[in-house]
Amino acid sequence: MTDAAADAPIPKPDAGDRARPERQEPLVAADGRPLKKSLQRSLRRQKLRAFGLVAPLLLFVLVTFIAPIADMLFRSVENQIVSETLPNTTAALVGWDASGEDLPDDAAFAALSYDLAAAVEQRAHTRLGSRLNYETTGISSAFRRSGRGIDDVGEIYLDQFVALDPVWEDSGFWARMIGAEGWAHPAPFAPSAQAQGLLPETAAAYTAFARAMQIRNDDDPAAEEPWAPVYLALQRDLSAADAGDVSAWTGPGAEQLEAAHAAVGGFESVPVRDLIADVDDAWLEHDVWATIKTFSPPYTPGYFLTSVDLKLSPEGAIVAQDDYQRIHVLLFQRTLFMSLVIMGCTILLGYPIAYLISNMPMRTANLLLILVLLPFWTSLLVRTSAWKVLLQQQGVINDTLVWIGLVADDARLTMINNQFGTIVAMTHILLPFMILPLYSVMKTIPPSYVRAAKSLGATNWTAFWRVYFPQSVPGIGAGCILVFILSIGYYITPELVGGTTGTFISNRIAFHISSSLNWGLAAALGTILLVVVLVLYWLYDRIVGIDNVSLG
Amino acid sequence: MKLKTVLLSTGAAMALAPAAIAQDMADSMTLVSWGGAYQASQVNAYATPYQEMHPDISMTWDESSPEAVAKLRAQNEAGNIAWDLVDVVAADAIRLCDEGLAMEVDHDELLAPAPDGTPASEDFGDLIVSDCYIPQIVYSTTLAYRNNVEDWNGTPETVCALFDTENFPGTRTLERRPINNLEWALYCDGVAKEDIYDVLETPEGQDRAFAKLDTIKDQTIWWSAAAEPPQLLADGEAVLGSSYNGRWFSAIEEQDQPISMLWDMQVFDLDGWIIPEGLSEERLARVKDFVYFATDTQRLADQAKWISYGPARESSAPLVSTHADLGIEMGPHMPTDPDNASNTLLYNYEWWADYRDDLDSRFQSWLAQ
């Protein structure tokens, strides 16, 4: 950017205005073109050049800053995992009323077995389990346990179909019967319209199977025997189908379907619900189904609700989080409050120092500035740990106080692992961010103003308060914004010295990113934090005016 | 089709002749571990000898194990797996395996048999808690106390000394998470060891555990890094607390601090390797070669020279010798030593997978209030 400034005139919006008076005399430019056009052209060229110079930075900011933020915002509402992993189940649950007492109908149970078998093959089921476990405890293990037995659901029908005609075991036969005409392996499997019409569940179950084979191992479904849930689907479809419709089937499998349709009424059968409950009895719990239904849309407000201590109940209503789990609002309040306190402390400590430095002879001022910057260059962890050594109960400060006799040995002060410790350590760490803008602003205040005020009879206080202070406000503004925004997102220091009462919302965000893997909730919390900062910035602009901020 | 046949037949040929693979191994590896004394013990016991055998291999260590699950997930989403071998605790291995981020391995094929020919899967036995997991060591989270506190009435004998503020007053330090703490609280509230998880499953049981923890909440410093408790005890900031047994060992034996171990109700956990899913063939070949070497009976026993964690192989136990620098017998410092393991708790991975989210938010909210 400095190169750009040196090479080209800075493309300030008023650059054109300034150029105008020089060329205003003739209405036609030197080459005879109308002045207006000529001016526009040169302006456009300037703008393009300016843009070209800024483009690398713009691209950098877009890629490394805007894109991750957009991705984060998106994650806070994104919830496609449910409908992607359980497409048939979520479709079967559309008509089911989650607020009632009843479990969903058999179609949903059957659909679950088709989806889950495919999910297990692609190892997506436990991932979905952990996703839904954020909402209802116990779902994680329900999915994991179900993963072990789900591809046996429907085995009873598999055996009977195969006993009827061994062709039902033939993998190629299945692919020909269900597959669309002209389908061959590397292309994603698609069922024929006829199969979808007469055997909707079988088509869905087989498609789920075939796609899972193709995606997971790049296997040709036509060479793999379908798993048992596909036979459950076939049994259900054939039991529901009309003899007339079955006999109208054309293409591969016509005979076999007709024979199977005639026989299926005599098959030994078990209610689907019992088959699924055999795999895991969690599926007889209303809440599990209701949670799936409530979180089946591709976008959910769930994470944001959790962020403000509300939640979507399994039935889909917005209710308050259980008392004992409320934490986020408290942490947001605490983060804001403590950031304000830290900001206040840095003003109180930083202002006199900045004043002192800016009014000293150059040499001493430089030395003091280095002293301000020195801790700034030291590792954050070192500074934080140093505060531990100083503030702990067996630490330097307590030892000194006990030695002087101000504090009894058995009543040492608790100054760390609480809010006090966080405020002290963070004030120290963020102090340079207040001092430096203050210093650079104070440097530009001419000392003659204060002298003039005093010569006109102002007291020291009046001269400072009415003349000097207002001129230093832009520095305070800049320092406040820097310190506040930095501290609101602080994480390491509160984690190390904050104990239980001095932690920030960012500690929760970090926890959800790295430990609980609840990235959606972390994103929602982060988004709220971002919005809070923007709102405060806007308020600041309204009250103080952002033009009043100066870094020097 | 032709290409596929060629590939398939080469694959078959390679499987038949393992020696042939040796030529196609990557010459660099990125290993992920926990840093500190633990990683140092791995470098000393596995990596240095391996590099002596293969001087042209470069090994990079990344101390990212605490965030391994999150980072592997991110690498997987970005389609760029940067790590070759990752050291994680059992619960994380189960999660990584669940999410398809770790490779399932055949333990008998991948790992060396015991010297007497026992296949690896039997040698490791029950410690193979997941199909993706290659255990290395058994560690435990256990208590220790300052052994020179004047106003104490006796010395702590059981884990319940934590809650006995009359006889053992002073600041405690416990991990800032519900796991282990809730179990200990219920146990000390009179719940039998085998019933702990059944009780903890009920809302009343959870209330009970939190009520028990309430009695010491104000006198406890809650740590998030396992290095904190030894420091807190050494400084006299706390008098009683939990950490990993290896951390206590180094504070007691290497730094000579006035601290004693309290092994009662130590909670066992495992640490081991997982191989990330999606490595290229050369990288995978190199990793397999390294893992075969690094998890054999002698190497696992060697690791105990530098850290007091028990080798995960049964056949390694008799080979555990003395500490490399201190020269003391390491056997009695192992969590698995019969004297130390008279009353232990094996934490229930599956149970915590279900209740972690719920109880963690409850625990954090309890702490914050």
Image: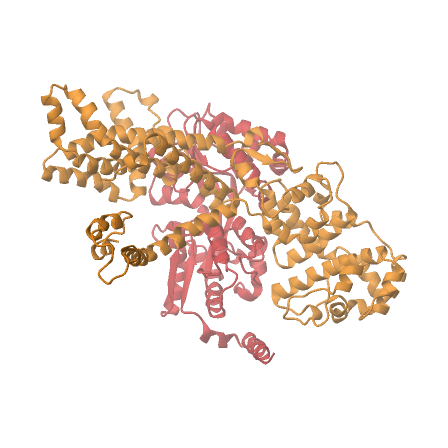
Chain colours: A orange, B red
Query: Quarter of the image holding residue B240?
Result: top left
Residue at left 84%, top 55%? A240
Residue at left 82%, top 65%? A162
Q: Name the residue nearer the viewer: A73 or A33.
A: A33
Q: Name the residue nearer the viewer: A100 or A109.
A: A100
The picture places residue B80, in percent across and down from the top left corner, at 46, 61
Identify whether B232 is placed above or below B336.
above
Residue at left 37%, top 67%? B52
The picture places residue A530, in percent across and down from the top left corner, at 43, 40
Identify whether A548 is placed above or below A230.
above
Side (left or right) of A416 relative to A135: left
Q: Which image quadrant: the N terminus of chain B?
A: bottom right
- Number of marks drawn: 0
The picture places residue A175, in percent across and down from the top left corner, at 73, 68
Q: Name the residue nearer the viewer: A498 or A509.
A: A509
Answer yes or no: is residue A419 visible: yes
Q: Name the residue nearer the viewer: A96 or A224.
A: A96
Identify whether A356 is placed above or below A408.
below
Query: Quarter of the image holding residue A245?
Result: bottom right
The picture places residue A144, in percent across and down from the top left corner, at 64, 50
Side (left or right) of A227 relative to A78: right
Side (left or right) of A439 relative to A338: left
Answer yes or no: is residue B237 visible: no
